[in-house]
Amino acid sequence: MPQIACLECSRCQNRLSADTPQTLCPIDAGALYVRYNMDELRATARRDNPARYAGQSTASLGMWRYRDVLPDVAPVTLGEGWTPMLQSRRYPGLLIKEEGANPTGTFKARGLALAVTMARHYGLRHLAVPSAGNAAGALAAYAAAAGIAAHLFMPQDVPFANYLEGIVYGADVTMVDGLISDCARLVGEQIRQQKASGTPAAETWFDISTLKEPFRVEGKKTMGYELVEQLGWQYPDAVFYPTGGGVGLIGMWKAFDEMEELGWIERGAKRPKMYALQSAGCAPIAKAFDAHQPASEFFQGADTFASGLRVPKPYGDSIILDIVARSGGRAIASTDEVILASILDWAKHEGLFLSPEGAAATAAYDQLLASGELKPTDKVVLFNTGAGLKYTDMTADAMHLKRPGGGPKLPTSLPVGGIITPI
C-alpha cells in the first residue's frame, strides 16, 4: 500500500501534509484530494494479480483488493466492496452495479470504511456527520467497529432504517426538523462551540461530512476501479450515477485518472459519459446543468422520497458539473411519480428492488432509450446505490400501502415444538 505524498486542493492545487487530519484547503475551502507518488506506483502497483491475495483475509476480495492505490493503513473493514454487476434481463447493454450488497446496505460503506480507517490511524475519538440517512448508518457501523464515538445528525423524516441503525450501533443520534443543510449547520456550530470553550482536542468532534475530509472520495473511487475490472479493464460507454452529494461520481473520475496514469487503462481511451441523476423534487445539479451554470444554487423547497438525493446544495457541485460536461454526459431529474413507477417496473420485470435513488437512474435510462439518445446495446453501468429494503417505509408511503391488519402482533409466548420436537 502506498504512502500518501500530499493532499491537494481541488480548486487551487495548494498542497498539504497528510501527517495530521485535514478538512478543507485553508486558502479557498476547496475539497482535498489524496495524491500519491505516481512514478513509484507505476513500478509497484499491479492490476488484477490474484497472487496478491494468497493467504490474505476475505477483505482482499472487497474494495481493499485495490490497496496498491489506497493509503498505507490497517483497514477497518466489514467486507465492503466488490459488489455484483448484474446483467439486465431486458436490455443487452445494461449492467446494474448492485451497491445494496455492501455492509449497511448502501454504497456509503465504501467511503466511511476508509474515512473511519484514517480517523483511527490519526487517533480521532469523536466523528460527526450530517447525513440524508445512509452515511449516518454507515458511520455508526464503522465507528462501532473501530471503537470511535459517532455523532449523527439527520432530518427527522429519513427512512426509519437509518434512525434504527444509529441507535442499534450505539451512536449519538440527533434528528433535525429540516434538511441535510440544517444538519450540517448544527454540526459546524457544535464544533465551533467546542473549540471556543476549550474542549480538549481528543474530545472535540471531527467533521466527516461529504468532501470536507479527503478520504470518503478515496473509498468511493474503488467503484471506478471495480466497474472497469469487472468489464475486463475497459470503460463502458456510459455510467449512470444517482447524485446527491456526488462523492461517488467524483471518486470514479479520480479512479479513471489514476488508472490511466498507471497504465492500467490505455491513456487516451474514450472515457464513459457520466450521467448525474436526480429527483425533480431536489435537482440542483440538473437545474444548473440545463442552465449551463458552473455551480448550482441552493434548491428551495426540496421534497422527494428519494431521501439520498435530497441535498439542496452539494459541496462539490462545481466538480460534478465539470465532470459531467467534460465526459459528454448529462444531469437528468425525474419526478417522484416516475421514480416510483420505475421501482415497480424493475421489481416486477427484473427481480430487483431498487432504492428510490437507483430508480432515478433507471427512470433516466428509460427516458434516454425512448428518445433514441441511447441504444439498448450501448454498454451502460447503472448504479443502484442502496438496497430497496432500507426504504420500505418510504416506498410504502409513496404507494399509499398500509400493513394488512393494522400492524404487527407479536406473540406473548412461543410454543416449543414443531417439525422436530413434539408439540
Image (cartoon, helix red, strand yellow):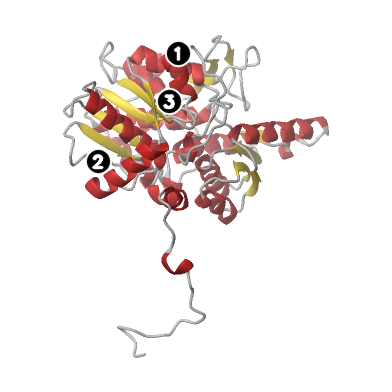
333 horizontally vs 370: left or right: right
Q: Is residue 312 visible?
A: yes
Instruction: Name which quarter of the figure residue 226 lies in.
Output: top left
| Residue type pointed to by label 2 | Leu
Q: Which residue is mark 3?
A: 251
Number of callouts:
3
Q: Residue furthest bottom?
A: 422
The numbered dot on residue 291 is 1
For mark 3, give the secondary structure: helix
Which of pointers 1 and 3 lies earlier in the amino acid sequence? 3
Find the distance from the CA under tag 1 to the CA under tag 3.
25 Å
Instruction: Name which quarter of the figure residue 248 lies in.
Output: top left
Residue at position x 54%, y 30% in the image: 210
The numbered dot on residue 86 is 2
Residue 13 vertical placement versus 398 (above, below): above
For mark 2, give the secondary structure: strand
| Closer-to-camera residue (333/44) | 333
